[in-house]
Image (cartoon, rainbow, N blue to C red):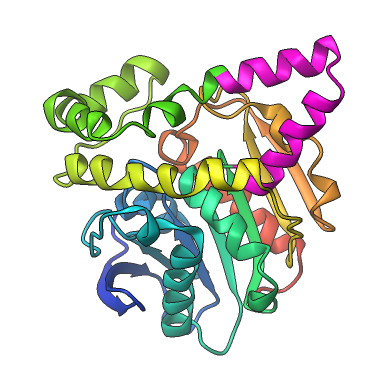
């Protein structure tokens, strides 16, 4: 880890509230935007950002509801169109004249699929690296395909993924998930991650808040998109990093993505869900190599 690399924190005025962002690297370098997952905040990207900051301006921001960004409540505030509006505000500020390289993990990857497949953002995203977070629309078609052709293998894939998604169903309940975060999960989160996958997560002061507000991401989007999927095609080259030991996302979800992604690379890595934390150096190397394969950084 390049701990000597300084960072700069700044605010971005989004359409609905203020987002807190942090940047590393030269101000005039090509921009990489990192989008964190649930129940994380921008701090999960610190070591990855420091690995990339020699060549890029790396920007990570707290998604609405997380970290130091504004914290709305209620289903409409967390829909994908509002998350995309926040992302656009960020890139308008940090790279108004050049496309950015986009990297997402977990729910950061889920929402970044919305950005990368949005025709209105064509030309604003130079590349997209996705890890441990499928496009909800693509997942909806994946589920339909398995149920329409219920071979034993398809039914096995479907069953395993539904079991891996157990927490999604729990998050649809009123008040109970928030109560669990306040009563137990919040203060024990690092220990739970270490127990379930061996990854060391640094305790975060906003962990309870990140967990309680972030459940709205699932309530606002998952069932709506999975049950009524749209045909969404990537507007930029995509690298999918498949963590083969992921407890939440099955490798099979990304096997048919060439249907939706004209320029696709898919790489399986022997890693658990929080690979960007457990192996920041390796993760950053995948990002750097992918951007490099696309040609001279824009």
By secondary structure, the bulk of the magenta-drawn segment is best described as helix
Residue 181's place in the image compared with 115, above or below, is: above
How far across and how far down the image is residue 42, in percent?
Answer: 33, 55
Residue 11 in view, yes or no: yes
How far across and how far down the image is residue 102, in percent?
Answer: 56, 63
The reply to whether the magenta stretch includes residue 177 is: no
Q: Nearer the viewer, residue 211 or 243?
A: 211
The reply to whether the magenta stretch includes residue 140 is: yes
Quarter of the rendering containing residue 20: bottom left
Q: Nearer the viewer, residue 198 or 14?
A: 14
Quarter of the rendering containing residue 62: bottom left
Residue 123's place in the image compared with 149, above or below, is: below
How far across and how far down the image is residue 45, in percent?
Answer: 39, 51
Q: Looking at this view, name the residue that lies furthest to the top.
A: 152
Highlighted range, magenta: 134-162
| Residue at figure coordinates x 59%, y 67% from the top left | 101
Residue 298 in view, yes or no: no
| Residue at figure coordinates x 81%, y 38% from the top left | 256
Q: How many marks?
A: 0
Q: Tell me if 148 is positioned left or right of 200 in this view.
A: right
| Residue at figure coordinates x 59%, y 64% from the top left | 115
């Amino acid at each position: 880890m390049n701990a000597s690399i300084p960072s700069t924190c700044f605010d971005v005025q989004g359409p609905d509230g203020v987002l807190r962002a942090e940047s590393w690297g030269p101000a005039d370098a090509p921009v990489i935007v990192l989008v964190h997952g649930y129940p994380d905040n921008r701090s999960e990207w610190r070591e990855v950002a420091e690995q990339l900051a020699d060549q890029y301006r790396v920007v990570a921001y707290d998604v609405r509801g997380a970290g130091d960004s504004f914290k709305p409540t209620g289903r409409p505030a967390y829909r994908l169109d509002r998350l995309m509006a926040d992302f656009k505000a960020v890139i308008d500020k940090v790279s108004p004249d050049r496309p950015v390289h986009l990297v997402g993990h977990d729910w950061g990857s889920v929402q970044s699929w919305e950005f990368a497949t949005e025709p209105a953002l064509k030309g604003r995203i130079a590349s997209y690296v996705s890890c441990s977070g499928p496009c909800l629309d693509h997942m909806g078609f994946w589920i339909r395909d398995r149920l329409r052709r219920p071979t034993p293998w398809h039914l096995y894939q479907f069953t395993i993924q539904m079991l891996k998604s157990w927490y999604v169903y729990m998050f649809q309940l009123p008040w109970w998930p928030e109560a669990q975060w306040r009563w137990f999960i919040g203060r024990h989160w690092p220990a739970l991650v270490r127990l379930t996958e061996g990854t060391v997560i640094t305790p975060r002061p906003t962990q309870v808040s990140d967990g309680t507000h972030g459940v709205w991401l699932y309530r606002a989007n998952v069932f709506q998109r999975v049950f009524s999927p749209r045909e969404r095609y990537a507007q930029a080259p995509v690298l999918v990093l498949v963590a083969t030991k992921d407890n939440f996302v099955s490798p099979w979800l990304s096997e048919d993505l060439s249907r939706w992604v004209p320029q696709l690379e898919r790489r399986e890595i022997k890693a658990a869900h929080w690979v960007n934390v457990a192996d920041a150096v390796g993760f950053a190397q995948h990002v750097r190599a992918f951007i490099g394969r696309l040609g001279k950084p824009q």
